[in-house]
Image (tube, rainbow, N blue to C red):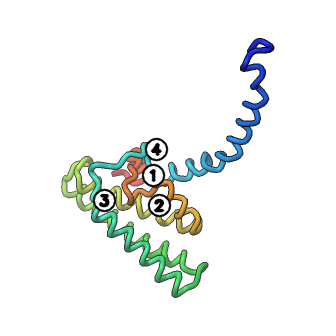
Amino acid sequence: MAKEGSYYHRKREERKEYQKLYYEVNKGRRKAGAVWHAQLAHSNPTDDPRRDADAEWALTDDCVALRDRLSEQLGEDGWVPEFIGTVQTWIDKYVREAHDLINGGVGAESLRLHRLRRLVAGLLQEQELAQQGGDARRAALEDLRLVLWGRRVNTRAFSDFYDW
């Protein structure tokens, strides 16, 4: 406990007010972090050096084009189920390709399998963001939290779910 009359004792109320304000401003960000962890985004914000950036950018462009086309055709609220279904077919294709690689004797640490893992995780994240609404994707873009933009994949959580 600070002595009465000391600097820390005199500034105690100011510190408490600052902490309350800080908590109010930042509490939403803390809650959003749990959502992204569930989306297989690794907590380390560094870029993944083994990623195939060209394939991921192409897939991002495909997702954006599909989102735009469907929202234009089906309206602001009707595009989400169609988007999720289409993205799920892409996910199924990549999962089948990964299982074919595994059955062909490719090790779990192969570069192609890692890149497939990244594509599937990125598409799963796109599905989740579509369900949450447009603001969620915008926030993820602003925070650079998209797997398809280089965010690392939590491979432990991924392998628990997909077994590869």
- Amino acid at pointer 3: Leu
| Residue where numbered disc 2 is placed | 125
Query: Split into 4 quadrants, where in the image is the N terminus?
Result: top right
Q: Are marks 1 and 2 in contact (CB under 8 Å)?
A: yes
Residue ranking furthest to the left: 105
Query: In front of the other: label 3 or label 2?
Result: 2
Mark 1 or mark 2: which comes first in sequence? 1
Tell me how many marks there are: 4
| Number of the label disc, if any, that sits on residue 139 | none
Mark found first going from the N terminus, 4 or 2: 4
The amino acid sitting under disc 1 is Leu
Crowding at dot 4, Cα within 10 Å, few <14 / some 14-19 / many 20+, comes out as: some
Vertical relation: 52 (above or below) 47:
below
Placement of 158 over or under 73, stated as above or below: above
> Which residue is labeled 4 in the image?
43
The kind of residue on which mark 4 rests is: Ser
Picture coordinates of residue 57 (x, y %)? 34, 66
Q: In the figure, residue 124 lies in which quadrant? A: bottom left
Q: Which mark is residue 40?
A: 1
Q: CA distance from mark 3 to mark 2?
A: 14 Å
The structure residue drawn at horizontal position 19% and vertical position 53%, both measured from the top left corner, is 105
